[in-house]
Image (cartoon, rainbow, N blue to C red):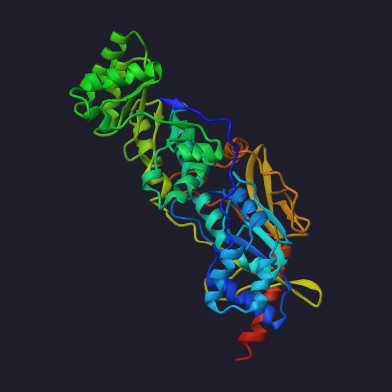
Amino acid sequence: MGMTRKTFGTVTDKNLALFTDLYELTMMQGYIETGHNPTATFSLFYRDLPPNRGYVVTAGLEQVVQCLETVSFGDEALAFLTEFDFSEEFLSYLEQFEFSGDVRALPEGTVSFPNEPLLEVTAPILEAQLFETVLINQIGFQSLIATKAARMRDTVNEHGDDQSLVDFGSRRAHGTDAGMKAARAAYIGGFTGTSNVAAGHEFDIPVFGTMAHSWVQSFPTEREAFEAFVDVYGEESVLLVDTYDTINGAQTAMDVAEARGTDISGVRLDSGDLVELSREVAEIVGEAGIFISSGIDEYEIQDFLTNGGIATGFGPGTALVTSDDAPSLDAVYKLVAVERDGELQPSMKLSTGKVTYPGQKSVRRVEDDGQFERDVLALHDEDAPGDEQLVDVIIDGSLVYAPPSLDESRDRTCRQFQKLPQETRRLQNPVEYPVHVSDGLQSQTASVRDELSARYLDAR
């Protein structure tokens, strides 16, 4: 049975002022007490792709915007922070805290690649420092799930016949917030909807549901269970047919529908040899749909479809909301420029294996004949080929970007996939998409590295 809720808008997350690591606040107090509050630019990016990933679909920007616009330290938060012996001066600063900086970011639904900024924050370092934890949390997690969902949608597009994909994973997510955000991110990645009613309410995502085995088991017979359900839901009914015997269950479902004089939306299979069972069930249910919901991920969907399985929809759960084959994006938030003598100066880390490109960036995307050919990672103000992917979101603390609807972000993902090379989209061993580092960025990186090496390494 499918239902949609289309009358609700998004609801702002509760204030996330305290959703930060203690050392962010410790540094912030240190900046105040030393009078050190230069403007700085922080870049949020990832250095390496997760296993068997050729891209990442970005998501979570809307929650970032909500956080930056609404963050405030109220009486309860300030009272809690007194337990850490923060100074009155610092607590007074937090009481008046407002974000006054700039944010540039990739729109949700944009494919991204290593070292490309998903988001850049330029602000007084006191402000920019606070948001490291929440930005990585919101963008890192949702981007991971959006990517997993996009891989499933791409697999259906390649091997299937536009089968629906419905998020069934809330009960296996790592907490209620993760379940909600996973449903949102999966929709951006190309899913049809979710089974979670709260996610449908909060994010205006289509909501779908069927029945559980417990419904069938609670009646004296399977037939009586189906009759009762059809009596209530009629042609919207999707009957779970594998509680006892899948083939007998499918036949009983159709017998009940005929006896009640109604069609049903379909049946659901949740166990067994799904390829073979789906073929046999298809011969019984005819035009009714077949929904598959047992241990589904992109690999299982590919195997199911290429081996002749028959389905009108899939209900991925655990594998989706935990991205179980690649559960971490390992995004980082690094300082790349800091004000000195009234001007932003590029900065970078030299740590082995953790070197960063210095300075504010530009992400340029070059197309050839309607296909993505390469990206160019360049300096922000550099004349480089391709179309700029980063957009202005906040300027001087004011929102200048209207976050698109989830449907618009979902459409962006679809459009981007139509242009992304097939070999980069492969489920296993994808070909690395070319990201070129511009001459200007290479030159700046070498210059800053030499300067820092002379200052800190050669002096030893």
Q: Quadrant of residue 452?
A: bottom right
* Residue at left offset 61%, top offset 76%: 27
Q: Kindly identify the residue that appears in the image at 26 percent across and 32 percent down.
A: 213
Q: Quadrant of the C terminus?
A: bottom right
Left or right of 284 on screen, residue 105: right
Give the residue drawn at x 63%, y 77%. 29
Q: Is residue 223 above or below residue 452?
A: above
| Near-viewer residue (289 or 433) | 289
Left or right of 74 in this view: 163 = left
Point out residue 370 in the picture as x, y percentages from the top left corner.
Answer: 66, 37
Does residue 132 appear left or right of residue 145 in this picture? right
Image position of 72 with respect to 423: above or below: below
- Percent coordinates x, y for residue 131 in the rendering: 61, 63
Q: Residue at x 33, y 31 (%)?
A: 307
Residue 352's place in the image compared with 48, above or below, is: below
Tell me residue 458's x, y (percent): 63, 88
Give percent across and percent down for residue 55: 53, 49
